[in-house]
Image (tube, rainbow, N blue to C red):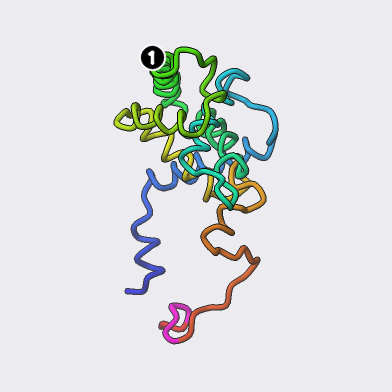
Amino acid sequence: MTRRSLLLSTLSAATLSDIAKAQQHAESAKSSNAAFRYLSAADAPEIEALAAQIIPSDGTPGAKEAGCIHFIDRALETFDREKRELYRDGLAAAQKERVELFPQSQTIAGLESSQAIALLKRIEQSEFFALLRTHTIMGFLATPEWGGNQGMVGWAHIGLEHRMAFRPPFGFYDGEAK
């Protein structure tokens, strides 16, 4: 059995559904890369500030430069819309922790880096943080068509070259199998 036939035989309806969701996500991201479709103007900078601490800009572009907030916005609008409540509740809990830790602060986005890290350490065991971390990493490394990885900075960070075509590997190749 070749890898190609194995792959084709294992495709399921759930996989096809996921592909459709990803396509919907990509189409949504193409339609407007600047305006937020789900996140409010008040919530977006708060979430972006947290994401910017997960993948910081320390000599290389981070989550902010990659536009991870746009990926998160598109995710909550499309394939992860059932996670909206988790984001709402999680951000509200993070705001509550911010007020408790730094009573003089006004917003998460206004915190200094060390303060934002202290806040993240307080919420790092929450479901919200786990999802935010996942979305941030996905937004940093996903195809730019999906809203994040603007300028392909995530790919550059891991050394991935974006080319239209790649040469097949040397040695055995499924296309040669009979």
Q: Nearer the viewer, residue 177 or 96?
A: 96
Residue furthest to the bottom: 171
- Neighbor class of circle 1 (other Cα within 10 Å; few <14, some 14-19, many 20+) is few
**Which region shows up in magenta?**
171-175
Q: Residue at x 51, y 23 (%)?
A: 108
x and y percentages locating residue 5 in the rendered image = 38, 68
| Circle 1: element type | helix
**Position of the C terminus by quadrant:** bottom left
The three-letter code of the residue at mark 1 reads Glu
Q: Main secondary structure of the magenta part?
A: loop
- Please indicate whether residue 176 sits to the left or right of residue 121 in the image: right
Vertical position of residue 118 compared to residue 136: above or below:
above
Vertical position of residue 95 compared to residue 123: above or below:
above
Vertical position of residue 11 compared to residue 6: above or below:
above
x and y percentages locating residue 53 in the rendered image = 48, 37
x and y percentages locating residue 120 in the rendered image = 40, 31
Q: Nearer the viewer, residue 144 or 110?
A: 110
Q: Is residue 135 magenta?
A: no
Residue on which the image places disc 1: 100
Residue furthest to the left: 125
- Please indicate whether residue 162 sits to the left or right of residue 142 in the image: right
Q: Residue at x 40, y 47 (%)?
A: 15
Q: Residue at x 50, y 36 (%)?
A: 51
